[in-house]
Image: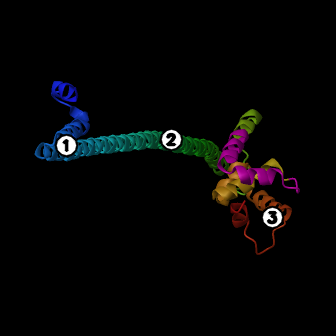
């Protein structure tokens, strides 16, 4: 019965060692030693074959496991590399934005400085033009007074009057004289604001004529020009200057023009 069942099995597969061992046992009981040895050898071959297949499968499994772990490690490295690249890209974008912001701020402040310089230049030009206009107005008033003085002096000489006395021609209307004085004061204020403020606030109480004298001296006018501008005689001019020196408490060696130039 064992032979009948064994003959029906054409391919024992993994059961080969047990299959050939049964044939070996049957042949041993029947006294077929050669056949028993043959099947004993087949048992060893089947065991070796199964062991080799199992080993190959084990190696294949280990290889698959190694490949899986390698691929997993590579994927992890790729993920880390992608994250690093993402961080680097983010840092690059932030750096570009910061650089752009710095450039914008630099351009903004540069434009502000340029506008400020331009405004300062315009202001200086306007101030220069204003001072030039004030100087022009002062010169115009001086020329008007000198022309009038020249005409009056000529009339005095023609009538035989002394040039040292006060002008005796037709007197200047009070309104015109006041208007000229105000124009001169306005020009002096614009040309020498600190000096005018010093003279007006001086504790000695300088009057308007004394203040004008100081401003004329500061402007560099000589006595022959200041006498007609102040509408006084030569003697009165020197008396007026001495009184101004006394009020400003100047010593005999002090120069009045140098003193006023420092204010």
- Place of residue 146 in the rendered image (x, y in percent of width and height, measured from the top left): 62, 47
Report the side of 92 relative to 260 (left or right).
Answer: left
Query: For the C terminus, which image quadrant?
Result: bottom right
Image position of 251 with respect to 116: above or below: below
Crowdedness near tag 1: few (<14), some (14–19) or many (≥20) residues, C-alpha within 10 Å: some
- Does residue 160 appear in this view? no
Q: Nearer the viewer, residue 233 or 204?
A: 204
Viewer-nearest of discs 1 and 3:
1
Q: Residues within 10 Å of mark 3 (few under 14, many from 20)?
A: some
Q: Mark 1 against mark 2, which lies toward the viewer?
A: 1
Mark 2 highlights which residue? 105
Which residue is under mark 1?
A: 28
At which x and y percent is residue 114? Answer: 49, 43
Tell whether label 2 touches label 3 (CB within 8 Å): no
Q: Is residue 162 left or right of residue 71?
A: right
Question: Secondary structure of the magenta portion, mostly?
Answer: helix
- The x, y position of residue 184, in whole percent, is 68, 44
Q: Secondary structure at mark 2?
A: helix
Q: Secondary structure at mark 3?
A: helix
Magenta residues span: 181-205
For image coordinates 73% across by 54% down, the residue present is 195
User: Which corner quadrant of the image does residue 65 belong to?
Assistant: top left
Q: Nearer the viewer, residue 14 or 257?
A: 14
Label 3, on which residue? 245
Colour logic: rainbow
| Relative height, residue 263 to residue 56 (above, below) | below
- Quarter of the image where one finds residue 57: top left
- Where on the picture, by quarter, is residue 67? top left
Q: CA distance from mark 1 to mark 2?
A: 104 Å
Tag of residue 46: none
Residue 107: within the magenta? no
């Amino acid at each position: 019965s064992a032979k009948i069942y064994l003959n029906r099995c054409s391919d024992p597969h993994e059961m080969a060692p047990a299959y050939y061992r049964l044939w070996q046992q049957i042949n041993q009981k029947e006294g077929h030693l050669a056949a028993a040895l043959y099947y004993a050898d087949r048992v060893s071959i089947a065991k070796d074959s199964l062991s080799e297949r199992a080993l190959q499968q084990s190696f294949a499994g280990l290889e698959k496991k190694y490949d899986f772990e390698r691929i997993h490690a590579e994927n992890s490295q790729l993920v880390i590399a992608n994250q690093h690249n993402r961080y680097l890209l983010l840092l690059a974008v932030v750096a570009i934005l910061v650089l752009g912001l710095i450039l914008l701020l630099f351009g903004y402040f540069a434009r502000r400085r340029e506008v400020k310089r331009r405004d300062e230049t315009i202001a200086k030009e306007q101030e220069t033009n204003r001072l030039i206009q004030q100087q022009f107005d002062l010169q115009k008033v001086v020329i008007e007074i000198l022309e009038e003085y020249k005409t009056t002096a000529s009339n005095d000489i023609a009538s035989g009057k002394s040039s040292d006395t006060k002008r005796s021609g037709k007197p200047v209307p009070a309104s015109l004289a006041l208007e000229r004085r105000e124009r001169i004061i306005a020009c002096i204020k614009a040309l020498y604001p600190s000096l005018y403020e010093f003279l007006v606030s001086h504790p000695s109480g300088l009057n308007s004529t004394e203040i004008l004298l100081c401003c004329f001296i500061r402007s560099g006018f000589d006595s022959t020009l200041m006498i007609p501008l102040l509408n006084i005689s030569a003697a009165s001019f020197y008396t007026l200057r001495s009184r101004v020196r006394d009020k400003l408490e100047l010593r005999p060696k002090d120069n009045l023009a140098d003193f006023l130039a420092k204010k």
